[in-house]
Image (cartoon, coloured by chain):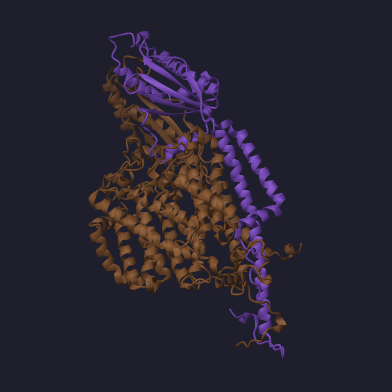
Amino acid sequence: MTEPDESESIELELSEIIKTLKSHWIATGIVVVLAVGAALAARLTSHSVPTGVATTQVLVDSPSSELANLNQNPTPLISRASVFAQVMTSSTVLQDIAKAAGIPASQLTASGPYSGSGEVLDTVTPAEARSSQLVGEKAPYRLTFVAQQNEPVITATVQGPTELDAANVANAIYTGTRAYVETAQREGSTPSEHKVTLRQLGSAEAAAVNSSSRSTLEVAAFLGVLVIGLLLIIAFEGLRRRDRELAVVQRDFDAELDAVAFDPRDRHQVATAGERRP
Amino acid sequence: MRSLRNFRWRPFAALLALAALAAVLVGYKPSLSPPGLHPRGVELASAHAQLLVDSSESEVTDIQQITEFRATLAAELALNYTLYLQSDTATGALGRDIGLGARHVVASGPYTLLLGRTNYAPTKPSPPQPQTVDHSYRLLVDVDGARPMIDLYAQTPTVRSAVALVDAARAVLQSYVTEQQAGHPPAGAAAVVLRPLGPPIAGVVDPGVRWQLMLFAFMLVLLVGGSLLWARRHRQGRLLRDAAATAKLDRLDDPPGQEEDAWPHTKRVLPWGLAGFVAMLFLVPFDAIDLPVHLPVNSTLDRPVVVALAMLWLCSLALVSGAARPRLKLTPVHWMLLAFFAVALLSLALNGGALASMDETSLVVKKLALLVSYILFFFIVASVLRPREVPRFAALMVGLGVVVALGTIVEYRFHYNPFYELWGKVLPVTKPTGFDSVDSIGRLEVYGPTLQPLELAAMLAMMLPFAIIGALDSPTKRRRTLYVIAVALLLAGGVATARKTSLVVPLAVAVVMVAYRPRQVGGLVVKLGVVLLVLVHFAAPSALGSVISQLEPGHVNTALTTTDRTARYDAVTPDILRHPLIGRGYESYAPQKYRILDNEYLGLLITVGLVGALCYLGVFIAMLAAAHRTIRGPDPRRAGLALAAFATVAAIMIASSLFDVLSFPHVPYLLLFVGAMILALREPSPATEPARILTVRPRDSAGPAAGGGLDLDPFPLAPPRVRTSEREPVLTG
C-alpha cells in the first residue's frame, strides 16, 4: 500500500500554496483581474457614499419676534418647536422640501425628532418601525431634526452626496417648511397677527465628510474578491489532489486485497469482495 | 474526456434534483387544496404615516392656539387613540377594510413609551381569542407621550396592502373621533381635528429575498450533498489514510527520540511570546486599557501585542530554518476563517453606501481590524505550537483560570476587583459602566478581567474541560486532587457571575465529555458531585442558588434576560431579510444604536448574512472534526487533550447563542488558541518527524547516504513497497 504523500492533501503548506497558485497562473490572474474589477466597481458605485453634510437652524417665532419682544412668553414656542420638528419628518413637509430643493421626494428620508444629542429614539425598535427605517436606508439625502430643549429652535442636519447638494437641501428645509405652514395658514384663514412665523438663522453651513470611506470600500472589495478567488483555486486544487491520493490509496488497497484473497497456488477464490477485511 | 466518462452522473443528477426541490420548498408552499405552489410569506413591505392631533384652528399655524396644558392634553389624546387602534373593534375593522374578511390585523404599540413591555408584571393566563388574527398584517401605533403626534407603521406582504393598512387605520380613527364628537359635541374650538400629514411612505423591505433564499438553499444542498457523496465514495480510502497518518504520530507520554525543545524547555521565542499572551488574556483587562498612542484602529493593549507577535513570527518565517521554523500549514479551520474574513469584507464593500450614510463604516473597519487580529493570532499559534507543548499550555491555562476564578470570588464576596484595581495603578484602565453595581434583576455585576460578566462566565467554562481531563488522566493522585480543586474553583468563579451561562455552558461541557467517555466522566461527576457542590457553595455563598433559581421552570421563560432574548427574534426579522445572503456589513449592528442581541448567530445573520454565519459555524465544525479524529486515535494523552479542546469549542458554540462572542476578545482569542491546540495534536512531534529533521541538515552536507546530515533510519517514511507477487499468501476465513 502506498503511504500517502504529505503534499497530496487538502492541508497545504505555504510553499505548496505558492506553487499551486503559480501552476494555475491563468486562474490566479483572472482572480486578480476580478478583484481589481470589483475595486473599480466599488469606486464607480461609491457615488452613493454621502460625502457632504450641512446644518441649518430654524427659529419658530411669532410675527412680532420673540427675540425682540420682552412680553413674549417663549414656553409655547418651545413646545411648538418640538411639535414642528416631528411634523417636519412627515411626508407632506418632505414633499415641500424636495420641491424647494428641486429633487424627487423619494430621495429624502427623515428621522427624529431627538430632544437632545444623547437621546436616541430608535433603540428597541419593533419590527414594523424598523422595516420603515430600512425602506429609507438607501435614500441619498438623510435629514435629522433636533428640537433644542430650552429654545424654540430646530436644528436640521442633512447628509447628501456632496457638500453642495447637502447645503441645497438644508436651505430648502426652511423654504419647504415655510411653504407648508403658509399653505396651512391660508387654508385655515389664520389671522396675520396669529401666524406662526419661521425664521432661518443664517444660511446652511456645509462640510465634507466620509473622505476615506470610498477608498475603504475599494480596498474591501479588492481583498474580499481576491481572498475568495484564491481560496477557491487552492481548495479546488487541494480537493483534486486529495481525490487522486485517496484513489491511489484505494487502488493499492484493492490490489493488496486481491493478492491476499486468492490462493496463488491453486487460484481458488477463498474470499469474495463482500468479505473484505476491514 | 476520461474523467467525464468516469463521472457518476446519476447521483449528481439526483443531487441536483434534490437541491432544486429544496430551493422550491424554501420559496413556495405546496398545497393540495387548492392544488399548486403558493409563495411563502418571506417578503415584507412597510408603510409609515403620521397623524397630528390638532384643533380646528391649527396649532401648527396659529400662534394663539397652543398652551402647555393643551399640548399635554393632545399628547394624552394621541396615546388614547393608539390604544383604541389596538382594540378588537378597530383591528377587525382594519381587517375588513384591507380585504382580509373576518380576519383581524395585529396591532401593537406604543414602543417609545415602552407600554408593550408586559414582562415587568407576571403574565396572566388569557382565554383563547374568538377572532382569527392574520399575523402577516401588522400595525404598530406609536406616540412618545410628549407630542400630539401619532405614528402609524404597517408591515404586510405587499406595499399596496401596507399603504392600505395605514390609510385604513387613519380612516378608522377619524371615523371614531367623528362619531364621538357627534354624540358629545365639544364647545367652540375644543373639537379635536386629526390631520393626516401627507401620504404614507412605503416600500419593499427585502426586495429579491425569495430568490436569494432559494439560491442559498440550492447551493447549500448541493454543497452538503456533494460533500457527502464525495465522502461516501472515498470512505475506505479516507479511513486508510487517516489510519496511516495516525500511526505516524508519536505518543506524548513516551520520551522523544531527539532533544525535545518544547516549551517551557526551549529557547524559541515565539512559544514564550504565546505564553505571555495567554497570561495577558487571563490576568489583564486588556480590552479596557486604551494605550496613549494613536493607531488607525483601536489602541487597546492586545493590538500592539499581536502586532509584536506577528513581527516576530514573520522574522522567524524569513530567517529561521529547520525544526525551529514555524510551520504554516493551512487546514480546514484556516480555510473557514479566511472565508469568513472574505465574506466580512464583501459585506462592507456591497453595503458601503448605506453604511457610510449611517456613519457606520468606521465601526465596521474597527471590527474588521479586530477580526484580523484574531485570525493572525490563530495563524501564529497554529504554526508555532507543537504537540508536546499542548499539555503544558493546557496546564498553564487551567492555572491561570484558577487565578481568575479566585479573583472573581474575591470580587463577588468583597466587592474588590483585583484585576481592574491593580492594573489601574500602572496603566490607563477604564472601568465598565456597571462596575460594582446590580443589574435590572438584582444580580451583582462581576467582571473579573473582562468587560462583561457573560464573557467571564464563558471564559471560566472554557477551562473546565481541561481541568476535568486533568482530574481524570493525571498520573499522580496529588495532581488529580489539585485538578478536582481547580474544577470546583472554576465552577465557583463561574456561578459568582450569577449568569445562567455559568451553569448552562458547564452542563453542555459535561454532556459532551460524557458522550465520549461515559464511564470516566460520568463516574467523576457521580463520585465528586456533592463535594464539588459543597466547595462551590462555600467559595461563592448563595451564588449557586441564585443561578439555579433563574433556571427553574417557572422563571427561565419569564425572566427579562430570557424574554428579551426571544423578543429579538421577531424584531430583527426585517434586518435579516433585508440582506439575507451577505448581510448589512460585518458587526455594523451596533447594540447601543439598534438593539442588544446577546446572540452571536443572530448578529452574524444580520451583519454577514447566511453565508457569513455558515462560515462562522464552519470554523467550529472544522475544529470539532479535527478534534474528533484525535479523540478516536490510539494515543490516550492526545485523545484526552483533544476531548477537552472539543468540549471547549462546543461550549463556545453554545455560548455564541447566549452572547455576542466576537465583540468580547478574551473568548475568541482563547477559542482560537484551543483550536490551534487541536491542530497541533494532529501533528507528529518535530523530534520524531523525519521530514522536519531533514531540514536541519546543513546546506553543504550531502546527507546521510554520503556520511552527512542525520540518520533517518529510526524514522521510516513509509513501509517498504513489496510487489504483489512477492507477498506472502494469507489465509482468510
Left or right, B23 with respect to A181, comes to right
Q: Image point 27% across, 51% down: which residue?
A: B411
Left or right, A209 with respect to B82, comes to right
Residue B523 location, x and y as percent?
34, 73
Residue B96 location, x and y as percent?
43, 39
Please identify the quadrant where the C terminus of chain A is shown: bottom right
Chain B colour as displayed: brown
In the picture as drawn, the residue positioned furthest to the right comes out as B1
User: Nearest the camera: B512 or B667?
Assistant: B667
User: Nearest the camera: B267 or A242?
Assistant: B267
Left or right, B182 with respect to B730, comes to left
User: Nearest the camera: B671 or B564?
Assistant: B671
Image position of A15 with respect to B244: above or below: above
Counting labels gives: 0
Please identify the quadrant where the N terminus of chain A is shown: bottom right
Image position of B628 with respect to A203: above or below: below
Q: Image point 70% across, 47% down: which residue?
A: A29
In the image, the chain rendered in purple is A
In this orientation, does residue A227 appear?
Answer: yes
